[in-house]
Structures are given as C-alpha cells and as structure tokens.
Image (tube, grey):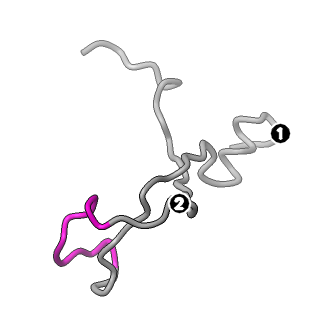
C-alpha cells in the first residue's frame, strides 16, 4: 500500500431506505442479532446514500461553518 489521501475517505454517510422498493428477507442472515429486534426478519431492499451524515458535515463541505 502507498499513502492514502484523506480526501478520498468516506467519513460517514446516512442511509435512507427506499420505501418504494419494499422489504426483502433474503439479504439478512437469519437468527439472533444485536442489530435488529428479534421479531424483525426483513430489511429494506435498497437504500439511498446521503453524503451528509449530520449538519456539521454539511456545514464543513459547503464552507458555511466550522466542521
């Protein structure tokens, strides 16, 4: 590996479920998990990726504040 430019790294992202695509059971491992309630056995089919995880990142990348 060589030097990794910090500007190429993803600091965080916000996943927004694509509600119109519905749910799917085939993507998640079935069984006990700390990531979801025991009664939930499905997940969203697809997601939108929002580049701004919070308002601080938005202000930083739009140059309107400290962040």
Q: Residue furthest front?
A: 21
Which image quadrant: the N terminus? top left
Instruction: Report which residue position mark 1 lands on.
Output: 64
- Our reading of the magenta stretch's main secondary structure is loop
Range drawn in magenta: 25-36
Single out the mark in the foreground, 1 or 2: 2
Q: Indicate left or right for 48 with 29 as reference.
A: right
Please report the residue visible at 55 percent of the width from the left and 49 percent of the height from the top: 48
Q: Which of marks 1 and 2 is nearer the N terminus?
A: 2
Marks 1/2: CA–CA distance: 28 Å
Bin the neighbour count of mark 2 within 10 Å (Cα to Cα): few under 14, some 14-19, many 20 and up: some
Q: Residue furthest bottom?
A: 39
Instruction: Report which residue position mark 2 lands on.
Output: 17
Is 38 in the magenta? no
Report the front residue among 61 and 67.
61
Image location (x, y in percent) of residue 43: 38, 67
């Amino acid at each position: 590996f060589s030097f990794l430019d910090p500007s190429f790294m993803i600091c965080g992202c916000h996943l927004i479920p694509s509600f119109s695509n519905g749910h799917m059971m085939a993507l998640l491992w079935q069984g006990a998990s700390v990531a979801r309630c025991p009664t939930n056995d499905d997940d969203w089919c697809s997601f939108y990726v929002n580049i701004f995880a919070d308002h601080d990142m938005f202000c930083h990348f739009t140059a309107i504040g400290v962040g």
